């Protein structure tokens, strides 16, 4: 329990212990659990028919009044709620596993012994700052109106803090996906790698920590530029 606080205050001590006694279940359960909770509560409160209409409009379609009426009549709030919650949990769990495999492979390339369990520990503990965003979203969900977009509740995103782009802007998805907390997660991953590799300099650790973020958001940036 102490580590759940110290990862924000004294991360070096927490990450050092993870090399010898990796614990991925505790932080993983928290990150995934809060994501599921926020997703469930949001889709339980949102106007499901309105949300479906917004999805159609954002995709560039121009549904007629009759088609919109049919959407409202046939939208199942329960199906959307449960599928969204399960999908968010599975998606996040898979991404954490991918990160773990990435750390495993990076260890083989760099000559640092990293097991899959250690990779999972570094992946989950380095993502703990995202809990801050989940808690802020939870507060927003509890006080939102039924016709509120999920993106508007992510108060740590680049769009919410700085840009405020219109929905049809080419960079809208990038700006809403990129959370400034991602910089914190990169730092924690780099710190853990530096401690585990016992490197004197930060160069290799920063490269390992930042590469996944650069790849993900680089691809999104290219997509935005091509629109």
Image: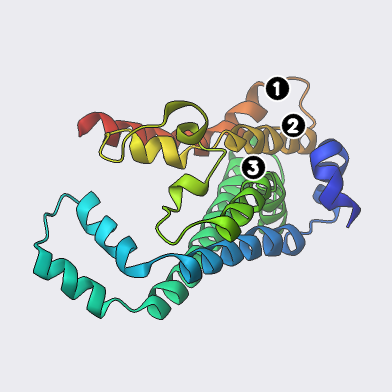
Spatial distance from mark 3 to mark 1, Cα to Cα? 16 Å
What x and y, as percent, mark residue 69? 17, 71
- Tag 3 or tag 2, which sits nearer the N-term? 3
| Disc number for residue 21 | none
Spatial distance from mark 2 to mark 1, Cα to Cα? 7 Å
The residue beneath circle 1 is: 202
**C-beta proximity under 8 Å, tags 2 and 1:** yes
Instruction: Label 2, secondary structure: give it.
Output: helix
Spatial distance from mark 2 to mark 3, Cα to Cα? 12 Å
Q: Quadrant of residue 54?
A: bottom left
Taking the image as drawn, is residue 111 in sight?
no
What x and y, as percent, mark residue 58? 24, 50
- Tag 1 or tag 2, which sits nearer the N-term? 2
Q: Nearer the viewer, mark 3 or mark 1?
A: 1
Number of labels in the image equals: 3
Q: Is residue 51 above or below residue 194?
A: below
Q: Neighbour class for label 1 at 10 Å: few (<14), some, many (≥20)?
A: few
Quadrant assignment for the C terminus: top left
What x and y, as percent, mark residue 110? 63, 35
Q: Is residue 206 above or below residue 16?
A: above
| Disc number for residue 107 | 3
Q: Is residue 162 above or below residue 32?
A: above
Q: Neighbour class for label 3 at 10 Å: few (<14), some, many (≥20)?
A: some
Quadrant assignment for the N terminus: bottom right
Q: Quadrant of residue 220?
A: top left
Residue at 53% x, 45% y: name it. Answer: 154
Q: Is residue 164 above or below residue 103?
A: above
Instruction: Label 1, secondary structure: give it.
Output: loop
Instruction: Label 3, secondary structure: give it.
Output: helix
Nearer to me, 139 or 116: 139
The residue beneath circle 2 is: 194
């Amino acid at each position: 329990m102490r580590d759940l606080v110290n990862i924000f205050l004294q991360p070096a001590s927490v990450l050092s212990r993870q090399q010898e006694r990796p614990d991925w279940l505790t932080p993983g359960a928290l990150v995934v659990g809060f994501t599921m909770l926020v997703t469930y509560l949001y889709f339980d409160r949102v106007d499901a028919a309105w949300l479906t209409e917004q999805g159609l409009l954002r995709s560039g379609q121009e549904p007629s009044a009759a088609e919109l009426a049919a959407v409202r009549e046939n939208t199942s709030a329960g199906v959307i709620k449960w599928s969204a919650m399960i999908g968010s949990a599975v998606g996040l769990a898979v991404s954490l596993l991918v990160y773990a495999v990435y750390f495993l492979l990076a260890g083989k390339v760099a000559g640092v012994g990293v097991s899959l369990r250690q990779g999972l520990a570094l992946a989950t503990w380095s993502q703990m700052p995202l809990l801050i965003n989940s808690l802020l979203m939870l507060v927003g969900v509890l006080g939102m109106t039924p016709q509120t977009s999920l993106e508007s509740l992510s108060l740590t995103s680049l769009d919410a803090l700085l840009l405020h782009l219109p929905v049809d802007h080419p960079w809208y998805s990038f700006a809403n996906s990129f959370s400034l907390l991602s910089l914190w997660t990169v730092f924690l991953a780099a710190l853990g790698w530096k401690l585990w590799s016992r490197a004197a300099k930060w160069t290799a650790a920063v490269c390992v920590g930042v590469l996944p973020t650069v790849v993900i958001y680089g691809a999104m940036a290219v997509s935005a530029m091509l629109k």
